Amino acid sequence: MKLLAFAASNSTKSINKALATYAACLSDEKVEVLDLNDYEMPIYSSDRENESGIPQLAKDFFDKIGQADAIIISFAEHNGSYSAAFKNVFDWVSRFERNLYQNKPMLLLASSPGPGGAKNVLDSAVTSAPYFAGEVKGSLSVPNFFDVFDMDTGKMTDQALNKSLVNLVDKLIR
């Protein structure tokens, strides 16, 4: 099995990338971690699409999802919603293929430094994924990230959250 993991963020110090990577590595499966910075495209507009077509990077991103057996995404929350980086990739890809997630099983995560745990964006992602052919197997919000995750070791330090995450990863790959 091949797991594809990425953060829905373009931050070079993304806590969500750390979380997605950690979650994917809880399995013994082959893991590929994507960086949204490798898929930076002009801001989507119908004018750009009509003038230039769909960027190759959008097609490449879609192909990466197609090559995976399961997907782990950890969402950053910007003003209660998706990050602009993720939304732009999503907008471009969904223009040529509405079924962006290609019926892949998914684990959706979100985290923030504060007590909200990016719950708003996670709820939106969980609700919308099935409309784009995503099979959500589980989700987890991780609040107070720096209190429950050690960035130096790249590991969850909160045992209850870690157990929940291990169980969700197991559910994803079974």
Image (tube, helix red, strand yellow):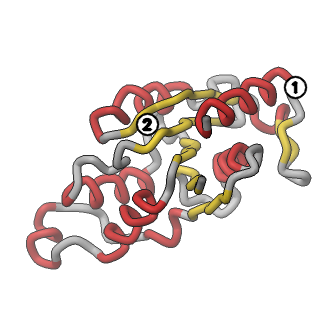
Q: Is residue 105 left or right of residue 158?
A: left
Q: Give the residue displayed 55% in from the left and 27% down from the top.
A: 138
Residue 34, horizontal then vertical, whole percent? 57, 63
Q: Is residue 136 left or right of residue 142?
A: left
Does residue 165 appear in the picture of this structure? yes
Q: Is residue 122 above or below residue 133?
A: above
Q: Residues within 10 Å of mark 2 (few under 14, many from 20)?
A: some
Does residue 143 appear in the picture of this structure? no
Q: Is residue 39 above or below residue 134?
A: below
For label 1, the SS is: helix
Identify the image quadrant of the C terminus.
top right
Name the residue type under label 1.
Gln
Q: Is residue 143 left or right of residue 84?
A: right
For label 2, the SS is: loop
The residue wearing badge 1 is: 159
Residue 165, horizontal then vertical, whole percent? 72, 31
Q: Is residue 115 above or below residue 42?
A: above
The residue wearing badge 2 is: 81
How many circles with numbers are drawn on the protein? 2
